[in-house]
Image: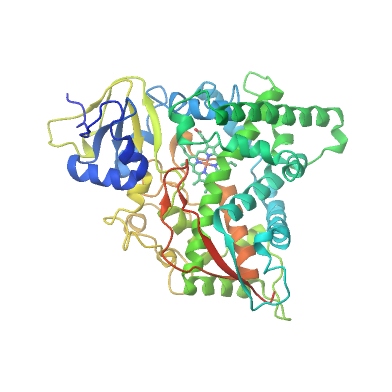
Amino acid sequence: KSQPPLVWHWIPFLGSAPAYGRDPIAFFRDCREKYGNVFTFILLGRRVTVTLGPQGNDFVLGGKHTQLAAEPVYGPLTTPIFGKDVVYDCPNEKLMEQKKFVKVSLTIDKFRAYVGMIDDEVKDYLNTDPSFKVYQMDDINEWGTFPVLKAFSEITILSASRTLQGREIRESLTKEYAQVYSDLDHGFTPLHWMIPGLPLPSYRRRDAAHTKMSSFYQSILRKRRENPSENQEEDVMNSLMKQRYRDGKQLPDHEIAHILIALLMAGQHTSSSSLAWAVLHVAARADIQEALYKEQVQHFGTPDGGLRDFGYDEIRDLNILDAVVRETLRLHPPIHSIMRKANVDIPVPATLGTPSEDSVFVVPKGDIVLASPLISQVDPGVWDNSESWEPTRWYDEKGVAAKANKEYNEGEKIDFGFGLVSKGTVSPYLPFGAGRHRCIGEQFAYLQISTVISSLVRRMEFRYEGTFPAPDYSSMMVQPVPCQIHYRRRRF
Ligand code: HEM
């Protein structure tokens, strides 16, 4: 049995790193045209076998963890940031238990409390951040601009820490720990991933920041244990303190600390880049912006022309808002490459598009395998107008029900409530992954992103001028290149 075709390249060790790094999507499309849905490329001396399309997604995401492991691929990036004994620095069975512990603390009851907290964070941010100076003035006709990446990364970290991380962490963010977060964050880059342990200042600062953060969390844990009656917060830390592994052991403090750091990092870039794309599109599409605002008025309008606060159960009913988030995650899923390492030789299923009926590829042991749900999420064979941001594809003329796309309508029944219920690992739409490594933050992310958008569109109008910003693939998550959005205060 043969190996998948090798993508042609000039320089042996470098391989296709420049093309993949510059624009992975163009690179994958180009390779698919030349080699089909399965091919191997060289990335800094490593062999990476890509399997595209819904079946390719299934091959990687539905693989047995004994055969396709995430830890050896992601560990070098994440362990120095998250810390020891969690996520990819422990056996997969332990990660599954840790994910279950976190899920327990991401319940609907907690979400109900979170909506108000996130709305408050947005309000405070608009009232205090210098980028929103015009918002803070009385003249509602004045237009200002704000920098997209900065605003959404700050709103994301403030709202995620207020809700998930607990009071002490939220308070520390505006004080001495802002720099520590930033140093840790600067260790979350493709360079730190591909070449671990370089003697550079960013690596040293990352490691120092991890040590400081970990001890800070652990000192909070000790205080909470000493004064249990004072600390009854409904946050993830308290919930983790009550959990036990299957063998009856409690989570040691350093593991609780490291799980919290992992959650902060896992949710930060994913949610903030999704928010940035969503609001940019809304700013560039007056009709959708108007529809979003009308939806707010229809559901929350008060007799005096104002808008009342909204709750978790209520924003779940906002179909246009839901479609805006869903469509943004289709076109801009923050994670473009999902990877595992092959522990054994693995045959590629023939349905994946092998060149002829009788030749089946084998991915050799040691290869990294890679799925890119983004490719199937913009496949013109599945989606009408696949390259355009069109939230209307997810609802009908009356603003209800999802007409979605051909595949889904013909497939199984899908829950179009909060968060798309995945149909398993064979799907063209997988922004949150699938299988055992599937995201546990999906419901929280939907809640966070939807709440921030609601908070913003009810208070401001947006406008985007000029060429729509291109995706920047040089950071870990696909975010827009630096850009500004125009805003003006509404009479609210
Ligand atoms: C895993 C996407 C937000 C925590 C994943 C995976 C994807 C993903 C694609 C699978 C990775 C893989 O299979 O290799 C997203 C997107 C988000 C988001 C698009 C927001 C728009 C969050 C948030 C949290 C979170 C807010 C935490 C509160 C996790 C965790 C995993 C995960 C713990 C599991 C990793 C594993 O089992 O290997 N996410 N995520 N994510 N995500 Fe998210």
Q: Residue furthest bottom?
A: 304
Asked if 396 appears above or below 481 in the picture, the reply is below
Asked if 394 appears above or below 110 in the picture, the reply is below
Asked if 306 appears above or below 128 in the picture, the reply is below
Q: Is residue 322 visible?
A: no
**Quadrant location of the N terminus in the rendered image:** top left
Dividing the picture into quadrants, the one containing residue 336 is top left
Residue at position x 57%, y 63% in the image:
317
In the rendered image, residue 74, in percent from the top left (x then y), is placed at 47, 29
Q: Is residue 68 visible?
A: yes
Tell me if 395 is positioned left or right of 29 in this view. right
Residue at position x 59%, y 54% in the image:
152
Tell me if 357 is positioned left or right of 467 in this view. left
The structure's colour scheme is rainbow
Residue at position x 26%, y 55% in the image:
381
In the rendered image, residue 383, in percent from the top left (x then y), is placed at 32, 58
Tell me if 458 is positioned left or right of 357 in this view. right
